[in-house]
Image (cartoon, grey):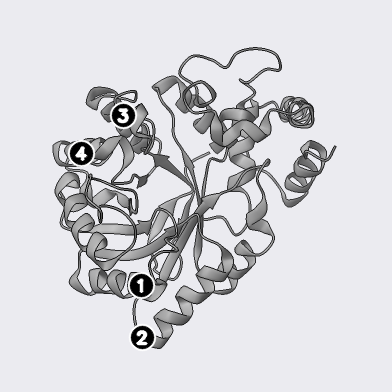
Amino acid sequence: MPMEYRTLGRTGVKVSAIGLGCGGFGGIGSEVSLFGRGEDQEQASALMDHAVEIGINYFDTADSYGGGLSEEMVGRWMRLRGARDGIILATKVFNPMGGDLHSGGLSRRHITRAVDDSLRRLQTDRIDIYMAHQVDPRTDLEETMRAFDDLVRSGKVLYLGFCNIETWRVVKSLWISERIGGARLTCVQNEYNLLHRDAEVELLPVLASEALSFVAYSPMAGGWLSGKYLRGRPPPPGSRMELRPEPYAGFQTDATYRAIDRFGELAASFGASTGALALAWASSHPDVTSILAAPRNLAQFETVEEALRLSLSADDRLNIQNESLVAD
């Protein structure tokens, strides 16, 4: 099945239903202790080349991934391939990028410095989607939204987004944007997968009603829904559970292992791998615009391509979530 492209909010811009997560380029996400543990330029370029070959046009990075190395690798690849105009490029701001007191957060001071640094590393004159990586309770949301609006007016940023944000804060941001006559959010990026479905309760309905896009990160729950973590066995070398297990500690329960066993049986009934079915399930939600896949090598793209061949009906979605939920 060819790649599907979906409209980003109210913009008319089309993004691939599966985007490329670039958090492994130069490190493993924003964790300082894991800088240097990710892909080098040659490996990252091979991943980006293949992503484009299968129709992915949405690339997602952040200033803090690999301590800036991810943005540098993406920028170098875009320049060498002449690929900038074919890519919908998203990057993020929030995490500290230096040792001084104001090197992180969502203050106007940090945002205005960070965007120029990202543009330099990415070797581009504009960022398609500029996202707050986290909420910042220390900074008034109006200051952040005014700073973001200035970036849009300047042409440095085309569209705005927020990651890891609560529904009430989305609504407040829209109210602020309307009151000040400023640029509003276009998309939200939060975790969404079969083991983490909080977004369905309030967030997705609100985003749909306001014509905002939703981008799902961790659609395989940090690899748990791939079936590679087995009860009573150590995690595979180089996996998230080996490198950074803390975010997934809550999954290490009998209930989760039983749910994943049931999910494996369901995947077999579709003639699919568990990872591919997890991606297809997350992508098939009618209010999800794109999901992020972050293969670490070319072989892992097989799961992404398998997911593209799966077509799930509304009944399929419901049956999968009902039969594989962690309910006990």
User: Which is in the foreground here, disc 4 or disc 2?
Assistant: 2
Q: CA distance from mark 3 to mark 1?
A: 30 Å
Looking at this view, is 21 or 151 the one in front? 151
Specify which label sits upstream in the sequence, 1 or 2: 1
Q: Which mark is residue 145?
A: 1
Give the Cα distance between marks 3 and 2. Answer: 40 Å
Q: Secondary structure at mark 1?
A: helix
Q: CA distance from mark 1 to mark 2?
A: 9 Å
Counting residues from the start of the chain, the first of labels 3 and 1 encountered is 3
Question: Could you give the CA–CA distance between mark 4 and mark 3, rounded to whole angstroms?
Answer: 14 Å
Instruction: Compare marks 4 and 2 and give the one earlier in the sequence.
Output: 4
User: Disc 1 vs disc 2: Cβ atoms closer than 8 Å?
Assistant: yes
In the rendered image of this protein, does residue 53 appear above or below residue 137?
above
Q: Residue at x 51, y 20 (%)?
A: 242
Q: Nearer the viewer, mark 3 or mark 2?
A: 3
Q: Quadrant of residue 114?
A: bottom left
Residue matched to label 3: 35
The answer to whether 86 is drawn above or below residue 106 in the figure is above
- Mark 4 lies on residue: 72
Residue 255 in the image, given as x and y percentages of width and height: 79, 31
Under mark 2, the amino acid is Ile
- Amino acid at dot 4: Glu
Residue 180: image tag = 2
